[in-house]
Image (spheres, rainbow, N blue to C red):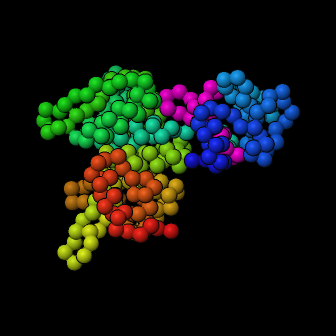
Amino acid sequence: MGGGTRQDQTNSRSGLSVSADTYGTSCPESELKECLQIGEYIIEHEGNGYSLKKEGQLLGTYKEATLLSPDRALFKLDKGMLLEVSPKGIRKVLSSAKAGILGFINSDGSLTYSTRSGAYRVGFGNCSDELLAKYSEFMNEVYGIQLRMYQRKDRNHFFELVKGSKEMAQDLDTYTTKAKGEWNIPFEYLDKESARMFLKCFMSGDSGIGNHRLSKRPTPRLEVRFFSNNRKGLEEIAILLREYFSINSSHIYERKDGAFVLWIMRVNDKIKYIKEIGSFKINHISAIESALKRVEPYG
């Protein structure tokens, strides 16, 4: 993610600013030795933080920059949000962790936010220990909380991680319509990295990557599928795949039970998906490793 040399990227991740000369940009005269110009925006590093200015006016100060590059900067905000600065302007984007939470919730989780009844609840349930651990990790990173785990007595080895919090439910309700019924994708808050994590966690929660043997084929066929009762949501996943990853061969089918399946059709698109996005689910990872042993790298 981002450009520059390996050392430049290391400096950015560790919170170090980089002089304008490193990027071949120019900044207005300043007493500060370190500054970066991105379009009309000036980023200055002083002491333990950064200031963002436009036409000499201070727009904000930030303690941590997660990315500094010639054409893009990301500053850490609270509750898993980032401020993106680019020549096009400034906007808030989801961190990978927060996008992952939304992917998990929209696939196999729950969100209740009702001011009328006073019901507020955020939850994710699954049989896979690795997914529960990843969801818990993301929730701790974004909201700084440890979640309690509850075992469902009506299902074998099925656990739920839930939190009854008005503030948390209200925050997540800003980025998904899950509490109102059918979920959606928050396009306006995504960049490529958060889009990748949303897809990866949605796939992990309640979708499929597998190698299926057919009687007339000498080798198994790789299948990459997204499942949901929400057709509009799957249509938005198809847009996300196309716009960020150039995966164009998706097709949505309706099953006999009324649910929907988004299939990735072309082999090269399937390989692109498992290489660039993937899944956290153990059996998905096993299927990906098996498939990659059989196919040649795509161009």
Q: Residue at x 65, y 42 (%)?
A: 8
Q: Residue at x 14, y 39 (%)?
A: 156
Q: Position of residue 114 (x, y in %)?
A: 36, 27
Determine the residue located farthest toward the front in the rendered image: 7
Q: Is residue 251 left or right of residue 282?
A: right
Determine the residue located farthest toward the bottom in the rendered image: 216
The region drawn magenta spans 62-85
Determine the residue located farthest toward the right in the rendered image: 29
Q: Position of residue 200 (x, y in %)?
A: 40, 48
Residue 251 magenta: no
Closer-to-camera residue (268/202): 268
Q: Classify 74 as above or below 185.
A: above
Q: Main secondary structure of the magenta part?
A: strand
Q: Classify 275 as above or below 144.
A: below
Which image quarter: residue 293?
bottom left
Work out whether residue 261 can be spotted.
no
Q: Position of residue 244 (x, y in %)?
A: 52, 55
Q: Is residue 253 left or right of residue 156?
A: right
Closer-to-camera residue (72/289): 289
Which image quarter: residue 205?
top left
Q: Residue at x 53, y 33 (%)?
A: 81
Q: Is residue 89 left or right of residue 118?
A: right
Residue 83 magenta: yes
Work out whether residue 294 can be spotted.
yes
